Image (cartoon, rainbow, N blue to C red):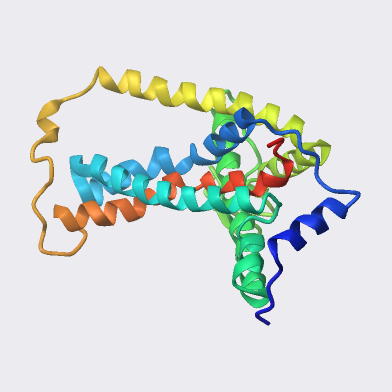
Amino acid sequence: MFATKSIDRIRAEAAENQHGLKRVLSATDLTTLGIGAIIGTGIFVLTGQAAAAHAGPAIVLSMVLAGFASALAGLCYAEFASTVPISGSAYTYGYATLGEFVAWIIGWDLILEYALGAATVAVGWSGYVVSFLHDIGITFPAALSSAPGTIITLADGSTTSAVFNLPAVLIAVAVTALLVVGIQESARVNAVIVVVKVAVVLLVIGAGAMYLDTANWSPFIPENSGQFGVFGWSGVVRGAGVIFFAFIGFDAVSTAAQEAKN
C-alpha cells in the first residue's frame, strides 16, 4: 500500500509510452494557463464578500497573506514539477514520495476537485448566458437552464420542473472537444481568453478609481466585534482564508509538466 515509484522509473515509463503527450507548451503558454485558471469567480466575488464580512479595508492585508501562502505552495509545485516533469500533478508526486495508497487518495481528490470546479464554472457560465440573452430580448426556456428537478416559478405564476442545464452541458462539451483537438490549440484559445480577462480586471480598476472615497478607508482595520473573524486582526486572517480561493489555479500549471517544451 505504501510502495513508491522512483523518479527515474516514472520518467522512464513516460518516455516508453508511444502515445504520450506532446511537449509543445512554452513558458508563455504555461504562464497564461496559470493566469487563466486564477482569474475567475473568486477574484471578482470573494474579495467583496471577505471585505464586507471579515476584514473591511484591511482586505488588502488579507490578500497579501493569502498571496504569500500561495507563493509558498507554488514554489513547492514548481520544485515537484521540475523534478518529476510528468502529468498527474499531486498524484504523481504522491506516488514518488508517499506511496501508492496515498497517491490513490490524492488522485481521487483531484478528480473530484476538477469535476466540481468544472461543473461550478459551467453553471456560472450558463447563468451569464441566459441573463445576456434575456437582456437582448431572447428568453431561454427555464426548464433547460437549471439542474434536473429544480422547481422554477414562471412569469405567469405557474411552476415547472427543470429538465437539465443545456447551456452548461454545451460549454462543457465545447471545452472537452477543444481539449481533444490538442493542447496547443487549447493554449491558444486560453491565451485569447486571458487577454480578455486581464483587460476586464484593468477596466474595473480604472473605472473604480474614479469613485474612490478615502473616507471609507478609516478605520483601516475595523475594531473586532467580539467574535473571532469578524473584523480586527482575526478578521484579516479569516479574510485571507476566504481570499485564498481567489488564488486557486496556480497548481494547474503543474498538470501540464509533460506537455512543456522545457
Q: Quadrant of the N terminus?
A: bottom right
The residue shown at (71%, 52%) is 86
Residue 194 in sight here? yes
Query: In the rendering, at what x and y percent does residue 104 appear?
Result: 67, 72
- Quadrant position of residue 14: bottom right
Query: In the rendering, at what x and y percent does residue 71 appear?
Result: 41, 46
Q: Nearer the viewer, residue 260 or 40?
A: 260
The residue shown at (24%, 43%) is 61
Query: In the rendering, at what x and y percent does residue 40 appear?
Result: 49, 39
Q: Nearer the viewer, residue 38 or 155?
A: 38
Left or right? Give the position of 198 relative to 164: left
Q: Quadrant of the C terminus?
A: top right
Query: In the rendering, at what x and y percent does residue 4 appear?
Result: 68, 73
The residue shown at (16%, 54%) is 233
Answer above or below: position of 83 versus 6.
above
The residue shown at (75%, 55%) is 11
Left or right? Give the position of 25 relative to 53: right
Residue 138 in sight here? no
Q: Nearer the viewer, residue 161 or 68?
A: 68
Q: Furthest-front residue in view?
A: 8
Q: How many marks?
A: 0
Answer above or below: position of 58 versus 158.
above
Q: Nearer the viewer, residue 30 or 81?
A: 81
Q: Furthest-bottom residue in view?
A: 1
